[in-house]
Amino acid sequence: MNPLKKLASQTAVYGLSSIIGRFLNYLMVPLYTYAFTKAEYGVVSEFYAYSGFLATLLVFGFETGFFRFSQDKEHKEKVYSTALNFVLLANVVFILLVALFVTPLSASLLYADHHEYFYWFALLLVFDSVASIPFARLRQENKALQFAGIKFLEIGVTILLNLFFILVCKRAFETDANSVFGKLYNPAIGVGYIFIANLMASSFKLLLLSPQLRGVFGGIDRVLLKKMIRYSLPMVVIGFAGIINEMLDRVILKFLLPFDAKTNMEQLGIYGACYKLSILMTLFIQAFRYAAEPFFFAHAKEKNSSKVYADVMKWFVIVCLSIFLLVTLYLDFFQYFIGKDFREGLSIVPVLLLANLFLGVYVNLSIWYKLTDRTLTGSFVSIGGAVLTILLNIIFIPKYGYTASAYATLACYGGMALVSYMLGQKYYPVDYDLKSFFKYFFVTLLFYFSFTIMNEHLPFVKTLPPFVLSTVYMLLFMALVWFEDGRQFFRKKSSSR
């Protein structure tokens, strides 16, 4: 099969669980932002930011380590059992530490009255971390359908439980606290029901993965473990630095904003909700990453690997720019996915979409350190991005609020992509089609800014039926892609059959 076609098909299958499935989960955002206040939703944004940091630490980079060392089929089972057991033991230690330090931890983060949030999140993180290794095995074995099926079921359970707790029980309590469903709702828990729903769904996921968890009986090979740790620990640094770039703003906003505590949490809630409007780009990148990582390793020894990687990058950028235009041109529609009180932050959505585009470019470029075992060198790129993120947020949040966080994210990912490109050309040269990248990038920006200016300054545009101008721009971009690259791509695809 054509390698691009294979990657596209696997990305599509993973997308069933990642893009489509998460999009269904994303539909919970209107439920949250209509059911809870801005400050309450700020709590949700903050806790999921913490979970991003800890999830990276608790997997220890062993997903990528598993891909790297399982290329030797003779030791594949040993690699799997070693990775699974190590991650399991590390997470047992983590849950014990949370139980030991929950009181000072909750007090320092201003949640002294909600110890339960920390217990629920700790269990959720443990379940997800342990599940990451069986999921990596499914990806490595190209069992995309099984992977997608389990993910879909988890998301389905999450959605159903959210609807039950918030839509059914909360409303029943507000109507009649003594009703059957009203008695199941405790207003003191509040947004905690979101956490409970995710925890229950994650435990259900582990149950579905139980056949894969039997690998725990294979034990740990100490010699192999040392090699895996040496390779994977830099991946932890890379992942942790990446989470700083992605999540730090939602952790520190409430401490750096110059308002009172309640207003700070409201601002955090607005930022977190508007960040969700960039999720289409994020989910595509995630689905691509699931398919691309094993694909890049498997294709590394092929003669035409460099050409394939360049083609992958070009089409990845085209899809991401299409998503950017889709969301920004139809933002008048997408804005209804968040409550009215949250929409004052819509101006940061285009910035966050561009930031995620450069994140995706960086993911593509990362093959240079993964395929050459230069993970330590690669970690310095992420560390540099993290330092830039921290400095920009600390300096500019007090003056510009969450807008500074959005631009800091863009500056960070843009800088990381540039540095990674230069290092990649030194250690693992790939002849990327930079001409196509800049052509599509600048056309996209031209379309977006001209569309914005026409909407704001040309009165006749407002007389047009809804989304006419948006659709014209989208069709123009699709036509450009077709005539520049689409026809040639499909000709090659047909001739390769």
Image (cartoon, grey):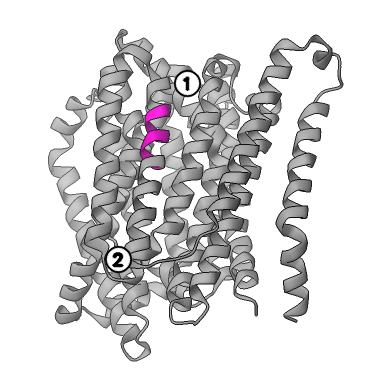
Position in image of residue 236 (x %, y %): 25, 56
Other residues around mark 1 within 10 Å, as few (<14) / some (14–19) / many (≥20): many
Residue type pointed to by label 2: Phe
Mark yes or no: residue 43 visible: yes
Where are the magenta residues, as a range?
Answer: 407-413
Position in image of residue 166 (x %, y %): 54, 30
Question: Is 158 one of the magenta-colored residues?
Answer: no
In front: 279, or 477? 477
* Element carrying mark 1: helix
Left or right placement of residue 182 versus residue 496 in this view: left
Q: Residue sitting at 37 percent across and 10 percent down? A: 263
Residue at mark 2: 62
Q: CA distance from mark 1 to mark 2?
A: 35 Å
Residue at mark 1: 270
In front: 265, or 283? 283
Comes first in the chain, label 1 or label 2: 2
Position in image of residue 309 (x %, y %): 51, 66
